Amino acid sequence: MTKQTALLLFHGELRELLAGRRRGAERVELPVTRRASVKDAVEALGPPHTEIHRILFEGDEVDFAQPLTPGARVEFFPAAPPVDPRRPSLLRPPLSRIVFIVDANVGRLATFLRLLGLDAAYCFAWSDERLAELASAEGRIALSRDRALLKRKAITHGRLIRASQPEEQLREVVDFYGLREFAFFSRCLRCNEPLLPVPKNEIEHRLLPLTRKYYQEFHRCPVCERIYWPGSHHEKLTERMARLLG
Ligand SMILES: [Zn+2]
């Protein structure tokens, strides 16, 4: 190693996130030609900062702002799931609760998360900038398949979704964050709002005859007024989710 390069070492799944011919590499010698932080250096190689959960600079734990210097040896570590974003870390401020914001490229994942009762903000019309602003303002974990989005500084917590199928993506998120407690059908699948119980007589006129006859308990979304009840569709979905989550 010459004096003008830094040695970057990548552990575990981070190696697969290195771009181009470097994919899979364990070590990268990077020319240090200008003042750059370790965040800039690592992201230029492919992995978004959200995928990095520990950095050792010459053996000392550092944060993303650490400048890269010639001759330095820097090690990057991926997450060791289950990850609890409420725990303090040198790399990112702790979140007060586990809530998500879902990018349009994994839109159906938002519906699945809501089905489990998890708070998942989503709107297909949000720009990357808007999504990053909301993630920051509301302390949400950004879920996306877009590395460029996750490289934005405003996004402190995020996860690059690997799976392409929505059910596998759900599994991925549930396992990654070690989520174990779910409240099936407690949230509107359309709006993400928590549902409220509603007396049957208030909504009876909106029900089909068989639903009116066989069901007594109903919930309503306070935003879109959609009505939910534990019908056969509800049971099938709950079973499917339970199977999926083991
Ligand atoms: Zn709703």
Image (tube, helix red, strand yellow):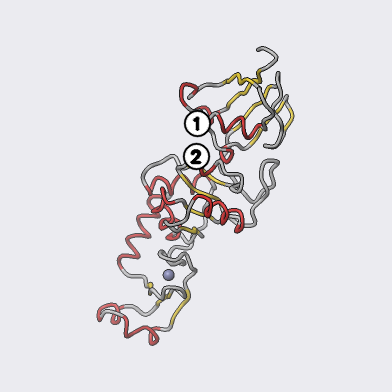
Residue assigned mark 2: 147
Circle 2 Cα neighbour tier, 10 Å, few/some/many (<14 / 14–19 / ≥20)? some
Q: Nearer the viewer, residue 185 or 75?
A: 75
Q: Is mark 1 on a helix, strand or loop?
A: helix
Up-down: is 124 above or below 209?
Answer: above
Which x, y percent locates residue 197? 46, 77
Q: Which residue is drawn at the image coordinates 58% and 47% (left, top)?
A: 155
> Quadrant of the rendered structure where residue 55 is?
top right
Measured as percent of width and height from the top left, residue 192 is found at 47, 64
Q: Earlier in the sequence, mark 1 or mark 2?
A: 1
**Three-letter residue code for mark 2:** Arg
Regarding ligand 1, which quadrant of the image does it lie in? bottom left
- What residue is disc 1 on? 17
Q: Nearer the viewer, residue 203 or 2?
A: 2
The front one of 216 and 91 is: 91
Image point 35% across, 59% down: which residue?
Answer: 237
Residue beneath the point at 43% across and 75% down: 220
Q: Considering the image in quadrants, where does the N terminus appear? A: top right
Q: Which of marks 1 and 2 is in front?
A: 2
- Which quarter of the figure has residue 90? top right
